[in-house]
Image (cartoon, rainbow, N blue to C red):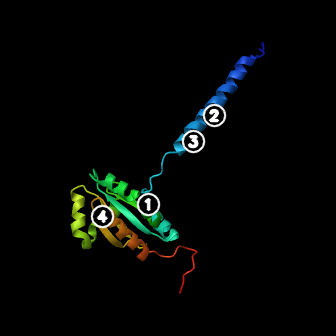
Amino acid sequence: MIQRKIQLHWKNVSLFFFALIGFSWLGYALWSRLQTIPHDPWKQATPVSARQKAEKEGKSILFLIEPQACTDCAEIRKALEGFADIQSSYVLDAIQEGSDPSRYESVLIDDRYGDEISALSDRRGLWGVTNGSDEILFLKKGVPGLEEESILLKLAEKNRFPSKGAEIEP
């Protein structure tokens, strides 16, 4: 049996290492590009995480109810995100009909807001405020304006609860 000696040319070895470095750089560039995709402030992992975040930060929850094929949800989102003080006063949360039917149906059951809830059948979005125990404090249909911003800021101050670790003043 004849054994052959494997000889590698230095050009092949250097080409292999440069290719390895190039693919590593390309992988890192793609990974870092994917990390810069903007985070959607309305997406929370679970309703419990939104409540925990609100309790930890001492805020209420501003939610958006989105029926399937919503006609005005994009405008509502832009308007609420455009209010500078709102994002610092609330934790944002979206309740979508298709992805979270139990939370969506729990809002439909609340009979205090029959007029607003009827807008969901017209494929229009609703937005409102809940406290830490998921009690709806405020519910409104349509795109918010400056009047609604002042209402939201008053609600945020009225319903602010102390964050964890903060001392409660007597």
Tags 3 and 2 touching, CB below 8 Å: no
Name the residue located 60 percent from the left edge and 38 percent from the top edge: 28
How many C-alpha atoms fall within 10 Å of the one at disc 3: few (<14), some, or many (≥20)?
few
Question: Which badge, 2 or 1, is on the more N-terminal residue?
Answer: 2
Question: What is the x, y in percent for residue 124?
Answer: 25, 56
Numbered tag placed on residue 11 in the rendering: none
Instruction: Identify the residue under disc 2.
Output: 24
Disc 3 residue type?
Answer: Ser
Disc 2 residue type?
Answer: Ser
Question: Which badge, 2 or 4, is on the more N-terminal residue?
Answer: 2
Name the residue located 40 percent from the left edge and 57 percent from the top edge: 81
Tags 1 and 3 touching, CB below 8 Å: no
Q: Mark 1 to mark 3: distance in Å?
A: 29 Å
Front residue of 6 and 82: 82
Numbered tag placed on residue 32 in the rendering: 3
Disc 4 residue type?
Answer: Glu
Is 96 placed above or below 115 here? above
How many C-alpha atoms fall within 10 Å of the one at disc 4: few (<14), some, or many (≥20)?
few
Numbered tag placed on residue 105 in the rendering: 4
Question: What is the x, y in percent for residue 113?
Answer: 25, 70
Question: What is the x, y in percent for residue 103?
Answer: 35, 63
Tags 4 and 3 touching, CB below 8 Å: no
Q: Mark 4 to mark 3: distance in Å?
A: 39 Å
Instruction: Identify the residue under disc 1.
Output: 84
Tags 2 and 1 touching, CB below 8 Å: no
94 sits to left or right of 21: left
Q: Nearer the viewer, mark 2 or mark 1?
A: 1
Number of on-image labels = 4
Question: Which badge, 4 or 1, is on the more N-terminal residue?
Answer: 1
Q: Mark 3 to mark 2: distance in Å?
A: 12 Å
Q: Mark 2 to mark 1: distance in Å?
A: 41 Å
